[in-house]
Image (cartoon, rainbow, N blue to C red):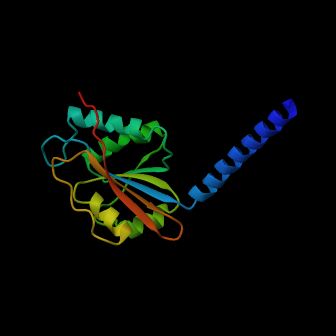
């Protein structure tokens, strides 16, 4: 009886390990983009984050704590860079800067295929990237007061896409 239990335990471990390896192989061809708007900002031409915005930027670290992230990218504004910095630091990555006027879904996919990317942008750009990758116009611009919604777009190795608009309401003091 002891031998049967031992054999079953070893078989279970072997199957579980095999499933983990299969899942890893399946994920290798998957590209995932998280399109996130910068956090709450002060007024001005290139404003800093408010105290709430700084807290929100820190809360994104918690959201991504157990997620693999290969790249953290941000537009060149102070508010997006400041929102991206805590996550990049926690993942031991640099914040890569992109040119808002030169980027679209196609260029992002060409550059980051097979990677998981967190892109910090603006209320009138992140929806466009999600739409570009899906080749549709499902998502409109975010409202100026909306800092809770973001987009997740996954593209498999065959170019099939899955996009969702998510909401994350953080407990900000």
Give above or below for 45 relative to 130. above
Image spot of residue 111 (x, y percent): 47, 64
Image spot of residue 151 (x, y percent): 33, 54
Q: Is residue 173 left or right of residue 30?
A: left
User: Farthest residue toward the front?
Assistant: 1
Give above or below for 165 relative to 66. below
Is there any visible trace of residue 37 in the rendered image? no
Q: Is residue 118 left or right of residue 121?
A: right
Is there any visible trace of residue 160 in the rendered image? yes
Image spot of residue 122 (x, y percent): 25, 54
Image spot of residue 129 (x, y percent): 33, 63
Q: How many marks?
A: 0
Q: Nearer the viewer, residue 38 or 48?
A: 38
- Which residue sits at x=57%, y=56%? 27
Q: Which picture quadrant has residue 85?
A: top left
- Which residue sits at x=51%, y=46%? 68
Is the N terminus in the top left, top right, bottom left or bottom right quadrant?
top right
Is the C terminus in the top left, top right, bottom left or bottom right quadrant?
top left
- Which residue sits at x=24%, y=37%? 53
User: Farthest residue toward the left?
Assistant: 43
Q: Is residue 129 left or right of residue 19?
A: left
User: Farthest residue toward the top?
Assistant: 173
């Amino acid at each position: 009886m002891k031998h049967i239990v031992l054999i079953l335990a070893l078989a279970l471990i072997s199957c579980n390990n095999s499933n983990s390896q299969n899942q890893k192989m399946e994920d290798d061809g998957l590209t995932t983009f998280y399109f996130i708007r910068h956090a709450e900002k002060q007024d001005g031409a290139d404003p800093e984050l408010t105290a709430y915005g700084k807290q929100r930027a820190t809360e994104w670290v918690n959201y991504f704590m157990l997620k693999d992230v290969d790249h953290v990218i941000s537009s060149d504004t102070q508010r997006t860079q400041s929102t991206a910095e805590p996550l990049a630091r926690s993942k031991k990555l640099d914040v890569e800067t992109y040119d808002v006027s030169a980027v679209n879904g196609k260029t992002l996919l060409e550059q980051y295929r097979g990677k998981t990317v967190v892109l910090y942008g603006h209320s009138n750009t992140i929806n466009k990237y999600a739409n570009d990758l899906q080749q549709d116009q499902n998502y409109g611009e975010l409202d100026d007061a909306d800092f809770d919604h973001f987009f997740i777009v996954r593209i498999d190795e065959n170019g099939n896409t899955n996009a969702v608009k998510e909401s994350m309401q953080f407990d900000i003091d």
